[in-house]
Image (cartoon, rainbow, N blue to C red):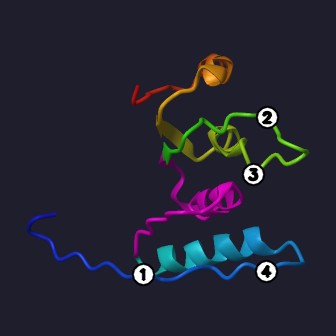
Amino acid sequence: LADRHVRMVDCGDVDKLHSGGKNPERITAAIRTILSRGAKPIVLGTDEGGCIPVIRAYDVYGSLGVVHIDAHIDWRDERNGVREGYSSVMRRASGMPLMKSLIWCEELPERDQSRVSTCLRLGRSWISTI
């Protein structure tokens, strides 16, 4: 990038609606708008409920890699009936056709060892910082 002009712009937040359940669609639409203008979004700070809608916005590209920085692997099948949110987002992402690589960066608590085993059994790679 040393010889290239790079411009970074903060596009702000996608305002969260507190009713109606349309937040995932709003997130996907916002990211698709950014992508349609030739920009490359860097998404930081979303809770687990925002990750899958962001990933869905890239479906026109055919493949995607994700770096997941978190204190745990988010590999549960579901949590309290939610399958695309808290503690399950990377498991859902790994099953999406466009997902080609996942890299986890985290300290791995002992309690997550069985989830790592499931991840590996499903054919996914695992890289840990510890």
List the residue tagged with mark 1.
Answer: 10
**Residues drawn in magenta:** 39-67
Tag 1: amino acid = Asp
Q: Residue at coordinates 90% horizontally, 77% vertically from top-left?
A: 20
Between the C-alphas of marks 1 and 4, the distance is 21 Å
Placement of the C terminus among the 4 image quadrants: top left
* Circle nearer the N terminus (3, 4): 4
What kind of residue is marked 4? Answer: Leu
Residue picked out by circle 2: 77
Is residue 59 on the magenta stretch? yes
What distance separates the C-alpha of mark 2 from that of mark 1? 33 Å
Closer-to-camera residue (89/96):
89
Disc 3 to disc 4, how far (Cα)? 16 Å
Q: Which sits earlier in the primary sequence, circle 2 or circle 3?
A: 2
Q: Quadrant of residue 76?
A: top right
Could you say whether the residue bearing mark 1 is in a helix, strand or loop? loop
| Mark with earlier residue (1, 3) | 1
Label 3 amino acid?
Gly
- Which residue lies most toward the left here? 3
